[in-house]
Image: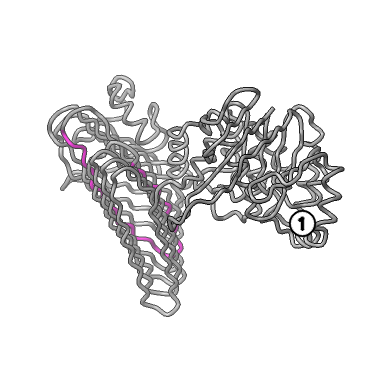
Amino acid sequence: MLELKNLSFTVENEDGSGSLDIIEGLDLTIPDGKFVVITGPNGGGKSTLAKLIMGIEQPTGGQILYNGTDITNMSITDRAKLGIGYAFQQPPRFKGLTVRSLLSLAAGKELPEDECCSYLTRVGLCSMDYLNREVDNSLSGGEVKRIEIATLMARHLDLAIYDEPEAGIDLWSFAMLVDTFKKLAKNDTNSVIIISHQERIMQLADEIIVLANGKVQSQGPKDEIFPKLLTEFGSFSNECTLRGEGK
Amino acid sequence: MELKDFKFDSTLTPTDQHMLREIADMIGTPDGAFNIRKNGEGVVKSSTDNIEIRQKADKPGIDIIIKPFTVAEKVHIPVIITDSGVQETVYNDFYIGEGANVEIVAGCGIHNCGDGDSKHDGIHSFHIGKNAIVKYVEKHYGDGDGNGKRIMNPTTVVNMDEGSYCEMDMVQIKGVDSTYRKTEANLADNAKIYVLERLMTHGKQEAKTDMVVNLNGEGSSAQIISRTVGKDDSVQVFYPNAVGNNACHAHVQCDSIIMDNAKISSIPAISANHPDAQVIHEAAIGKINSDQLIKLETFGMSEEEAEDIIIQGFLK
């Protein structure tokens, strides 16, 4: 179970004119086995919240508890060892590292070819074309993004955080990705947090959290929150879905 | 020494064997032709029906003569220096016949446990015949805990006939205090060269590279890739120069990772002396991207482990 208690993240303005609250006194509990979608307007603090949970950013106030342990000051490495993982919205590239090596590094062991292939297939990549390719600039943004998602699958995480997995992925591959997440959603032992604007991903959620101005604007079961979002933002949301946007 | 008198395990000390493994992946007597040079003299050489290794009469070094249309054969010509203070200049000339397809494994290892500087200057010239294919692998390595420096200054000149192809993989990862590497390639019509240079410097090491590729022939092409990592207080200077003298294509790419207090200069030069010459250069120097480190940390690695993985991959 993940518990965020009065969590805050404040940054100083570059011109020294004061500070800006990105996350403001956030209280949130995510029970085990839940598939949670965090959505909300741009600049609302969604990506920052994901980074705070992974330890990529340090909160300026409050506490993060994971299975009862205070991990607020724990390093990224130690949180990873507890079974927490994070998929970048814009994943880094690695010159000289092949897709197969990256998946093996994610798994923490040399992965057999068929296992690597199954992860790649699940994110819509034809595995034999990609296994020995380097994760460098020769891959498109969408390809790198799918490989990023495959690395999380290879880790078999207790808590997986995906920051806008749909961003940069074409509509055809997106359909396959939704199927993959659908399978993840059925698994009731591991928790998944997905930051997303996509209706089709929100529809998979057990719970939806709407984050705006660094605060939880609304939170509840999908069947309760999703219709409200459609009423409130229906036309905008549909437009985003059609354009494949999500930033 | 003739091959019949040579026993890999008894003629070579464990240090010799360690160095040969490091620089030429040699474990036991290699297949094909070979010549092992140790502390300033050849200790063993072996020719085959198609590849003749001949001691030079007028200066230190060997001629390697590969018959036309020799296919799928290898030549190993490693050099090791294990006595402190040995300094030598060695001339090796390769004559690769028309249509041959061979792999040449060179390499130099200096083990210096004394106070004298040890130095190997290898002057290599390649004459690659029409339509021949050559893969050349050269690894430079140093170790030993003496105060004497380990110095290597290789000069390589590659003359390529029509339609020939040369792939050069040159590596210096560890232990060489000072290196000044000079490479020149001259390409005839439709000749192609691919050069991958990988280098890591640490401590107070210095590395300088001058490389000139003259694309003289119509349809010739060159791809030069340099990947380097500079650590500690080391200094690296690169001066790649691609010269298009005909309708040709050349691509030079230099990437460096800079760490600690290292200094790296990449000074590219590209020239076109023909309207159909396409010559491109890309260069980048920068520290390890923090997102790369974070990504690997999210796999449960420490920052140091992540750094090692990134460097190993970059120099692979």
Q: Position of residue A57 (x, y in %)?
A: 53, 41
Magenta segment, principal secondary structure? strand
Q: Foreground: B237 or A39?
A: A39
Q: Quick check: can you spot residue A229?
A: yes
Q: Which residue appears farthest toward the front when viewing the image?
A: A18
Q: Foreground: B233 or A78?
A: A78
Chain at tag 1:
A
Does B243 appear above or below A13? Answer: below
Badge 1 local density, few (<14 within 10 Å), some, or many (20+)?
some
Q: Quadrant of residue A100?
A: top right
The residue pinned by badge 1 equals: A171
Q: Is residue A111 left or right of residue A97?
A: right
Q: Quick check: can you spot residue B35?
A: no
Q: Foreground: B76 or B71?
A: B76
Q: Position of residue B227 (x, y in %)?
A: 40, 50
Q: Position of residue B132 (x, y in %)?
A: 44, 56
- SS at mark 1 in the image: helix
Q: Amino acid at mark 1?
A: Leu
Q: Is residue A229 left or right of residue A195?
A: right
In the rendered image, residue A104 lying in the magenta stretch gets the answer no
The magenta segment is B148-172
Residue at 34% in and 53% down: B95
**In which quadrant will I find the C terminus of chain B?**
top left
Does A80 appear above or below B11? Answer: below
Residue at 47% in and 70% down: B219
